[in-house]
Image (cartoon, rainbow, N blue to C red):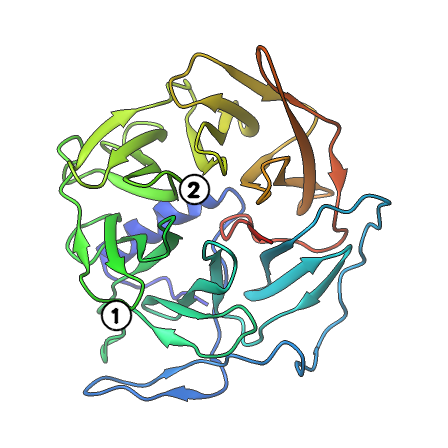
Amino acid sequence: MFQPAQPMRRRRFLALLAGLSVVGVAGCAPLASAIPGAAEPAVQVSVPNPASLSLGQAQPAVQQTADNPPGRILYVRDGNLWLWTAGASHQFSEGGTWAQPSFSPGGREVAYVYWAENFSDIFVMASDGSKSRRLTRFQAGNIMDNTWAFRPAWSPDGARIAYVSDANSRFPQLWLMGQDGDGRKQLALPAFYEESWVDALTWDPKGGRVAVTGAPNMRDASQIYLVDVTKQTVEQLTKHANGAFDPSWSPDGEWLAYIGRAGSQGTLWVRTIDGTKETSFDKLSYVRAPAWAPDGKSIAVLAQQSGAFEIFVVSVKVTNSGYELGEPRQLTRDAAVDPMSGLTWAP
């Protein structure tokens, strides 16, 4: 676990993450096999084949439904990846240091965060758990040195990955890199200065823009901002008094799902990018991490049940006034999903 006596930069950064996570920061533990590194300590990483993975703990019970949504949903439980499909969940990784998975367009690859004692890095692997490759290298020999990378999100063509990092700043900022880790660069956003920060993000399926959670300074509540990655301009989309976070772009690029905070709990909102149509969903409490189905016909979210987060799915139907959201259906029970790692959904 994280030790209390750490540099100020690290304490501030982790305090920010803890505040965003609602229920705290995920734990960390060493994994099984080494990745060779040149002139740097080796990172211990295990990428098991899901077909041969021997589970070391009981699987959460599954809420079976007569109409399970299609596709695959990846989530994180106890620092490991779990895969939900066809009404059942199974453990996809082991070692306790996995976070924030993100399916590539079409679902052939998965970007994910390796979260260690004093750093985190972004890796990519094939969706069957093979061919893991490391995209960032922030591990340091001194535990007092720390740099972080989080929130990988694929561009619609799969050629680039947006992510957040504090590599050149006090708090996390928006970065871009190629799908092979080359060409890493921080975006210079004029509305974001030294005390600004960026967290969860989603890429416009039409390309060229990223919607991010962020704030220009530490005193303001987070809102959703639209970033043009070519022009490096910023437009504020939401103005919720208590903040907004966890954006997720619809597959057709016309709608944005996100969480608007009302008091101490989050509510699911769906709106057009221009803000002319919007609707909220109040049938679930303490909601996090919306993720659209690949066909755009439903949204998966995390919501609290008995003090832990479980996966629910809500159908969506286009009407003249916007989206009509159906009754929530619970997909998992006793899964205790990590809300800060969110959900990712692929065919």
Instruction: Tell me which label, 1 or 2, sits earlier in the chain.
Output: 2
Identify the image quadrant of residue 177.
bottom left
Instruction: Give the residue pinned by disc 1.
Output: 138
Seen in the picture, residue 199 relative to 138 is either above or below; the reply is above
Instruction: Give the residue pinned by disc 2.
Output: 20
Identify the image quadrant of residue 138.
bottom left
Q: Which residue is located at x 25 percent, y 25 percent?
A: 235
Give the secondary structure at mark 2.
Answer: helix
Residue 21, image x and y in percent?
47, 45
Residue 76, image x and y in percent?
57, 59
Q: How many marks?
A: 2
Cβ atoms at labels 1 and 2 below 8 Å apart: no
Q: Which residue is located at x 48 percent, y 59 percent?
A: 101
For label 1, the crowd category at 10 Å Cα-Cα, with few meaning under 14, some 14 to 19 and many 20 or more, is some
Residue 331, image x and y in percent?
74, 47
For label 2, the crowd category at 10 Å Cα-Cα, with few meaning under 14, some 14 to 19 and many 20 or more, is some
Q: Nearer the viewer, residue 29 or 235?
A: 235
Seen in the picture, residue 233 relative to 175 is either above or below; the reply is above
Give the secondary structure at mark 1.
Answer: loop
Q: Which residue is located at x 22 percent, y 30 percent?
A: 234
Q: Inspect the image, locate mark 1, and give the three-letter code of the amino acid beneath it.
A: Phe
Q: Inspect the image, locate mark 2, and give the three-letter code of the amino acid beneath it.
A: Leu
Left-right relation of 176 to 231: right
Left-right relation of 78 to 218: right
